[in-house]
């Protein structure tokens, strides 16, 4: 999601690529995992979430 090359690709398309058939479920799961909505995450500088083991909201 943080890859600038994928900014033009809809979130739904990325979710489907990973096997999610319900974009709402994917968005909720992402927010629960990372503590930030997908749209906001896409606009963060790449260094902020370089360590994907921790929540970006911390």
Image (tube, rainbow, N blue to C red):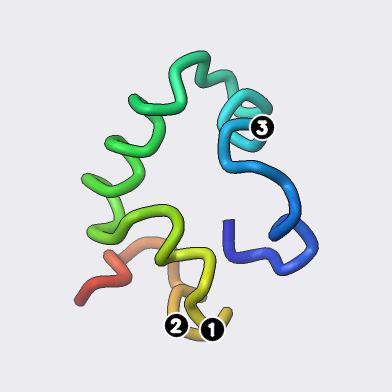
Residue 48 badge: 2
Near mark 2 (Cα within 10 A), the count class, few <14, some 14-19 or many ≥20, is few
Alpha carbons under labels 3 and 2: distance apart: 24 Å
Closest to the observer, 29 or 53: 29
For marks 3 and 2, the one nearer the N-term is 3
Alpha carbons under labels 2 and 1: distance apart: 6 Å
The correct choice, above or below, for 27 with respect to 22 in the image is below
Near mark 1 (Cα within 10 A), the count class, few <14, some 14-19 or many ≥20, is few
Closest to the observer, 39 or 26: 39
Asked if residue 14 lies left or right of residue 57, the reply is right
Near mark 3 (Cα within 10 A), the count class, few <14, some 14-19 or many ≥20, is few
The correct choice, above or below, for 48 with respect to 10 in the image is below
Judged from the image, the secondary structure of the residue bearing numbered disc 3 is: helix
The correct choice, above or below, for 27 with respect to 55 in the image is above
Say which quarter of the image contains residue 19. Answer: top right
Q: Residue at x 75, y 54 (%)?
A: 8
Q: Percent position (x, y) of residue 16?
A: 62, 24
Rendered-image quadrant of the C terminus = bottom left
């Amino acid at each position: 999601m943080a890859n600038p090359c994928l900014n033009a690709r809809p979130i739904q398309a990325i979710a489907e690529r990973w096997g999610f058939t319900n974009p709402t479920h994917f968005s909720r799961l992402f927010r629960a995992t990372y503590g930030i909505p997908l749209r906001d995450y896409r606009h963060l500088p790449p260094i902020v979430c370089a360590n994907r083991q921790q929540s970006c909201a911390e």
